[in-house]
Amino acid sequence: MLLESLEFLLTPTSPIARKYGFLYSSISLRHRYHRQKKNWLPHLKNCQDIFLETAQSLPQRKSVVVMGSAHLHEIPLHLLMDNFEQVTLVDVIHPLKHHLQAKRYSRLKLVTMDLTNALDKLQSLNSLDDLNALAQQLANEQLFHFDADLIVSANLLSQLALLPLDAVEKKIKRTLELSEKDVICTQFAETHLKNLKACTGTKLIYSDREVIYRDKNNEVIYNGHYPVKFDGYKKLKEWYWMLAPLKEASKNYSIEMKIEAYRG
C-alpha cells in the first residue's frame, strides 16, 4: 500500500487525469495485469507477434507512435526501442516508470493528450442529445495528427466514449440503454479511425470488437459489439482475450473480449 501511495503522489498527472480518476484507473490496471498475467499471455503474445511482423515489413524503422500506450502491456518498451530509433507514447496519463525512462532515454518521448478532445467538455453534457451533438461536432474536427513509420492504436476504440457516457448517466440519473451506448461508442470510434487514416505512416490497430459476459454456469448473459467499419484496412488476425475471469471483476460473471488486428 505504501508503494501504491507513493506512486499515486509522484506520478505526473494532468488536471483532467486527476479529476476523472485516470491515475487511479492506471494503477488499478497494472495490478489487474499482475493478477491475471497467465490469462492475458495469449492475448499479449498475439499483439507482440503482430507488432514484430508489421515492424519488420516496413521499408524503414525510424519512428513509431503508440496511442493509448498506458503500461505498454501489449507492446513492451524494449520491443519498441529495439525496433525503432524514435519512440513516442501518447496517452492521457503516463505511468511513473515511463516518465523515469523518458529522462534516461532521449529516444523516448511522452505526449500527454486526450485523443477524443471531449474530456474538457464533459461538464457541459446535460443529456444524451448533448452527447450526440458533441460526437457529431468532433467528427468534423481534426483531433490529432501524427507522422511516423508506424502508428499503433492500442485497444482504444471501445474506450473512447466511456467517460462521456458516464458523465451523461450521472446528469440524467439513469443507466443508458445498451443500444444508446452502442451508437455513441460507434461514433467516437469512427472519428478516431478517420483521424488515424489521415496520419502519415503505416497504421496498426488492436481493437476489441465484442465483449462477452458469462455467468457462474458459463452461460452467456450479454454479448455486446459496435459496428465500426475498417474500410481501407486489412484484417490480420482475431482472437479471444479473457480479460477478467469469474471473481476478478465480479463474483457473478466473467468478461471475455474478441480482439481483431488491422493494418492500413
Image: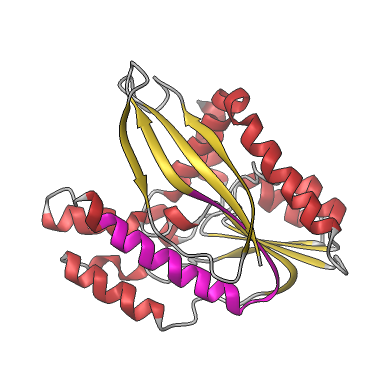
- Whether the magenta-drawn stretch holds residue 189 is answered as yes
Q: Residue furthest left?
A: 173
Horizontal side of residue 202 vs 199, given as left or right: right
Colour scheme employed for the rendering of this structure = secondary structure
Q: Is residue 11 above or below residue 139?
A: above
Q: Residue at x 74, y 72 (%)?
A: 148
Give the magenta range.
181-208
Quarter that holds the C terminus? bottom right
In front here: 24 or 187?
Answer: 187
Evaluate whether residue 199 shows in this view: yes
User: Which is more toward the observer, 169 or 46?
Assistant: 46
Name the quadrant containing residue 234: bottom right
Between residue 71 and residue 134, name the one nearer to us.
134
**Residue 235 on image: x %, y %:** 62, 57
Residue at 51%, 75% in the rendered image:
194
Magenta: main secondary structure equals helix
**Residue 73: x, y in percent?**
64, 41
Task: List the single residue furthest toward the top.
Answer: 217
Quarter holding residue 83: bottom right
Residue nearest the viewer, comparing 35 with 234: 234
Residue that appears at 61% across and 27% down: 37
242, above or below 152, in the image:
above
In the displayed structure, 36 sits above or below 132; it is above
The mark total stands at 0
Residue 68: image x %, image y %?
Answer: 56, 56
Is residue 105 highlighted in magenta?
no
Tell me the residue at 62%/37% (across/down): 43
Let me know if residue 119 appears in the view.
no
